[in-house]
Image (tube, helix red, strand yellow):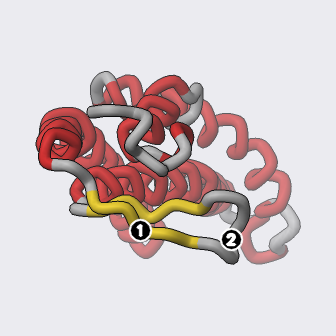
Amino acid sequence: MNAVSCPVPPEQRPLQEYQQLCNSWFFAWPSTDLVGLLRPLAISWLLLLPLTLIVATGSWSLRSDPAKLVLLAALAAISLPGLLLGRQWLGWSYVQRRLLSDSVDYEESGWYDGHVWPKPLAWRQQDQLVATHQVRPVLVRLRQGLGLMAIALLLGAGLCQAL
């Protein structure tokens, strides 16, 4: 891996992009375990809950049914964790695609001069290992988080219908 023969700027190399995600405060949430992902998502849900409660109290029909009001506000507050999970999924899946690719798309000075550089065999092997053993578990945790969010939405909608 001779860095001199590689025309790709260092910050656009897939392995460097992976390191940037790992060092990022936001994208590091799912990199350790599922609890490390769910804790900040629960905090974001709790922070949005008072706002959704205030908005829900504007509904005349919900004012007479406080249980439904709280339940619908709690369901609406899931939107912020959903957006955060979606953004994390996009970032991690982008890096995985770049790591698994046989070539690197890069730009030297701007969006208008894109180039493609084929990865040497050593780069492909290293990137494949990182994608398989480091990034794939993160995507699995994100998928689990999305699944838990979908279950919470379905249970909440079912409970709302029951009330």
161 left or right of 132 in image: right
Whether residue 75 is visible to the viewer of this picture, yes or no, is no
Residue 158 in sight in this render: yes
Which is nearer the eye, 17 or 137? 17
User: In the image, residue 89 lies at what x, y percent?
Assistant: 42, 55
Please give the label number shown on residue 111: 2
Give coordinates of residue 132: x percent, y percent.
14, 43
* Element class at badge 2: loop
Q: Position of residue 74 (x, y in %)?
A: 59, 52
Q: Quick one: label 1, few (<14), some, or many (20+) residues within 10 Å?
A: few
Mark 1 or mark 2, which is nearer to you? 1
Please give the residue where the numbered disc 1 appears in the rendered image.
Answer: 116
Crowding around mark 2 (Cα neighbors within 10 Å: few <14, some 14 to 19, many 20+) is few
Identify the amino acid type marked 2: Trp
Numbered marks: total = 2
Residue at the spot x=38%, y=42% of the render? 5
**Residue at image point 67% right, 63% down:** 65
Q: Quadrant of the N terminus?
A: top left
Q: Earlier in the sequence, mark 1 or mark 2?
A: 2
The front one of 138 and 152 is 138
Residue 91 percent coordinates (x, y):
47, 52
Measure how far apart labels 1 and 2 are at the Cα level: 13 Å
Q: Identify which residue is drawn at 43% across, 30% down.
A: 19
Residue at (58%, 58%) from the top-left corner? 83
Q: Looking at the image, which is closer to me, 40 or 113?
A: 113
Depicted 16 relative to depicted 159: above or below: above
Image: 112 above or below 135? below
Where disc 1 sits, the SS reads: strand
Q: Amino acid at mark 1?
A: Val
